[in-house]
Image (cartoon, grey):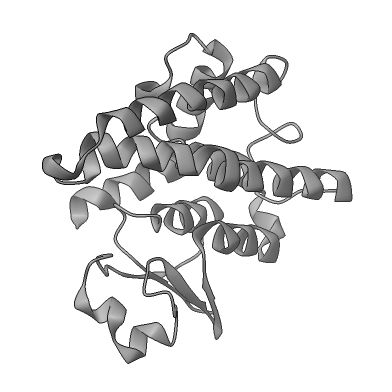
């Protein structure tokens, strides 16, 4: 079985890269920049018609959308330990993954764009401030859930933790309240050897 992951690590491709490292899947990393002209050309558009990264080719199964990719990798390799052992926990993995995509990421992205990502002339501080304020309520939800557990689902690290931690990779920058349980959980997730290997790929290009 062969896995190809398209996208530089300094993009949403960090999510499938981290998942592959956690699961011990051999993979080929095609370091395609999100602004590269190749993303708008036919060969890549056949993989991801949106013209964005990441995309994967998992032994002939082509997927885009980073969180869908991580869910697929975890579910298709249950021995890797990232998937749930029962239907209820499968539902909870879906719940937290969708929470990351709908409740957390749009605001975190808005804040990042208007503080660091966009050219300074295009940044609108008001939009960054509004996103940051709204994010605090989401972080309280996360903190309250983690007050009585070490991980989001079940008794150990799952793809739910990977997805939420990757979406909120700048948690320490966006948290304006204590949220001690969320901070401790986030540190545990990013300290994992697989996370360290995946994030080190940012320095590799």
Which quadrant would residue 61 be assigned to in this image? bottom right
The residue furthest top is 178
Residue 166 against residue 3 in the figure, above or below: above
Which of 174/182 is in front? 174
Q: Residue furthest bottom?
A: 42
Q: Quadrant of residue 75 in the image?
A: bottom right
| Horizontal and vertical percent position of residue 157 | 63, 37
Residue 81 percent location from the top left of the image: 67, 49
**Quadrant (top left/top right/bottom left/bottom right) for the N terminus:** bottom right
Residue shown at 50% from the left, 33% from the top: 189
Left or right placement of residue 35 versus residue 184 in this view: left
Work out which quarter of the rendered image holds the C terminus and state it: bottom left
User: Residue at 31% of width from left, 28% of height from top?
Assistant: 126
How far from the left and from the top, in percent, is residue 154?
76, 34
Q: Is residue 37 left or right of residue 43?
A: left
In the displayed structure image, the side of residue 124 where residue 173 appears, left or right = right
Res 171 seen here: no
Question: Which quarter of the figure has residue 30?
Answer: bottom left
Residue 15: x and y, percent?
A: 46, 53
> Can residue 37 be seen here?
yes
**Number of marks in the image?**
0
């Amino acid at each position: 079985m062969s896995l190809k992951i398209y996208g530089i690590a300094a993009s949403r491709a960090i999510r499938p890269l981290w998942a592959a490292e956690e699961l011990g899947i051999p993979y080929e990393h095609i370091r395609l920049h999100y602004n590269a002209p190749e993303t708008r050309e036919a060969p890549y558009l056949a993989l991801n018609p949106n013209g964005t990264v990441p995309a994967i080719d998992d032994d002939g199964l082509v997927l885009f959308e980073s969180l869908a990719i991580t869910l697929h990798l975890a579910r298709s390799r249950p021995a890797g330990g990232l998937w749930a052992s029962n239907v209820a926990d499968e539902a909870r993995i879906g719940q937290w993954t969708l929470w990351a995509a709908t409740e957390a990421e749009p605001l975190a992205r808005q804040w990042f764009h208007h503080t660091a990502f966009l050219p300074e002339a295009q940044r609108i501080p008001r939009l960054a401030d509004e996103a940051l304020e709204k994010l605090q309520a989401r972080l309280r939800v996360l903190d309250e859930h983690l007050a009585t557990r070490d991980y989001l689902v079940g008794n150990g690290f799952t793809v739910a933790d990977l997805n939420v931690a990757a979406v909120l990779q700048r948690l320490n920058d966006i948290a304006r309240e204590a949220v001690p349980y969320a901070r401790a959980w986030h540190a545990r997730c990013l300290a994992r050897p697989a996370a360290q290997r995946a994030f080190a790929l940012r320095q590799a290009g």
